[in-house]
Image (cartoon, rainbow, N blue to C red):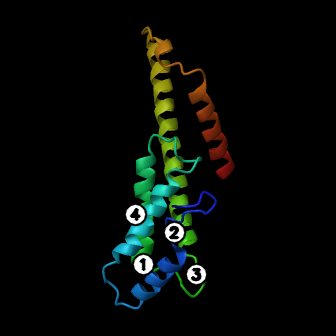
């Protein structure tokens, strides 16, 4: 029986660190041990349940991109065991950054889609076609998205 006050660790950082050190001693090209891959998968899955990520419709894409990024870092042996003994934090940060990158890409795609739709409506009205805008009204949600995206775009320039 597990105590309610004691946290349940789904990835043991010390064990993961020891497995990585052991694997790093093998020649390049050696298959990544299943224990390490399972830990990385658990990190990405659990990060996807965090409150700031769980309600996105493209969460599966975020998890898989995080997993690919972590495995890529593993294959390149970017984790340096001499710098610290917390691979859990290292791979969680890699997955987190990938989640943020996917969200940014999705916002950009949503922006482009909305701007294309607005341009189509404007062009149709100029030609004299009757356009039903009630089907495209979302109570300003997309206009807010466009404003935020353009503000961020100007800031980066």
Towards the viewer: 152 or 138 = 138
| Label 4 to label 2: alpha-carbon separation | 11 Å
Residue bearing the label numbered 1: 76
| Label 1 to label 3: alpha-carbon separation | 18 Å
Pointer 1 local density, CA inside 10 Å: few below 14, some 14–19, many at least 20: few
Q: Is residue 88 above or below residue 7?
A: below
| Label 3 to label 2: alpha-carbon separation | 12 Å
The local secondary structure at tag 4 comes to helix
Residue bearing the label numbered 3: 85
Residue 68: give its label.
4
Residue at 54 percent of width and 71 percent of height: 88
Marks 1 & 2, CB-CB < 8 Å contact: no
Which tag, 3 or 2, sits closer to the chain's start?
A: 3
Residue bearing the label numbered 2: 91
Residue 51: x and y in percent read 59, 47
The local secondary structure at tag 2 comes to helix
| Label 3 to label 4: alpha-carbon separation | 22 Å
Which is in the foreground here, disc 4 or disc 2? 2
Residue 21: x and y in percent read 46, 86
């Amino acid at each position: 029986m597990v105590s309610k006050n004691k946290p349940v660790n789904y990835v043991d950082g010390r064990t993961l660190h020891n497995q990585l050190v052991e694997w790093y001693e093998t020649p390049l090209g050696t298959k990544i041990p299943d224990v390490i891959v399972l830990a990385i998968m658990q990190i990405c899955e659990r990060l996807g349940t965090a409150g700031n990520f769980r309600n996105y419709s493209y969460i599966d894409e975020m998890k898989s991109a995080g997993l690919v990024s972590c495995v890529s870092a593993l294959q390149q042996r970017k984790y340096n065991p001499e710098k610290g003994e917390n691979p859990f934090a290292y791979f969680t940060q890699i997955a987190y950054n990938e989640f943020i990158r996917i969200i940014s890409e999705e916002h950009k795609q949503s922006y482009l889609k909305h701007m294309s739709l607005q341009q189509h409506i404007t062009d149709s009205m100029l030609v004299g076609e009757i356009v039903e805008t009630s089907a495209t009204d979302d109570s300003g949600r997309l206009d807010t998205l466009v404003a935020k995206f353009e503000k961020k775009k100007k800031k980066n320039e």
